[in-house]
Amino acid sequence: MNGWRIAFIVAHLVEGVLLWTLLKDYHFVDPSLYHEVKDKTSLDAIRVASELGRFDLASMFLAGISILLGVAAIFGFVEVRFRSEKRAEETARQIVDQKVTALFNEAMKTRGDGALPHVGVTKAVEADVLSKANELGKT
């Protein structure tokens, strides 16, 4: 077990040295072109990037990032909408379970069918009440 750790540490150190050497010695831009652009009087980032031929690379990189952010935003919106609808449905069911018995008892009292203090509501009656409420809500 310990031998593998040492091997991975050595491999990462060698990788770091190779990357540092590559970045130190690699000319991303032709040095003569760089010195020609650097000697100009008006320097701004966009002009230098376009003259060095790196403006298109930067534009493509930023366009790719913006596309990824846009796709992530769409999926995030859909996820938030789905979870909020689910939470609203769960909350509505809890409130219906708590209140429907009391409302049914109150309705029975006002109809004059006598005082029914502990009348329970079956699932069938609850489903009927919910379907009628949904029909009223859609009109």
Image (spheres, rainbow, N blue to C red):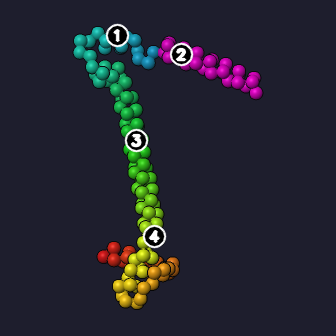
**Magenta-drawn stretch contains 23:** yes
Disc 3: which residue: 69
The residue that mark 4 highlights is 98
Of helix, strand and loop, which one carries label 2? helix
Which three-letter amino acid code belongs to the residue tagged 2? Trp
Q: Is residue 118 left or right of residue 17?
A: left
* Between marks 3 and 4 in the image, the one whose residue lies nearer the viewer: 4
* Residue that extends furthest to the bottom in the rendered view of this protein: 113
Q: In the displayed structure, would residue 134 be above or below residue 21?
A: below
Q: CA distance from mark 1 to mark 3?
A: 36 Å
Q: Label for residue 20?
A: 2
Q: Residue at x 37, y 89 (%)?
A: 112
Residue 94 seen in the figure:
yes
Q: Quadrant of the C terminus?
A: bottom left
Of the numbered discs 3 and 4, the one sitting upstream in the chain is: 3
The residue tagged with tag 1: helix, strand or loop? helix
Q: Rounded to the nearest whole Å, what is the CA distance between mark 1 and mark 4?
A: 78 Å
Please state the horizontal and vertical placement of residue 102, each as a whole percent of the image: 42, 76
Label 4 crowd (10 A; few <14 / some 14-19 / many >=20): few
Q: Residues within 10 Å of mark 1 (few under 14, many from 20)?
A: few
Span highlighted in magenta in the image? 1-26
- At label 1, the amino acid type is His
User: Majority secondary structure of the magenta segment?
Assistant: helix
- 10 Å crowding of disc 3: few (<14), some (14-19), many (20+): few
Circle 2 residues within 10 Å: few <14, some 14–19, many ≥20: few
> Residue sitting at 40 percent across and 15 percent down?
30
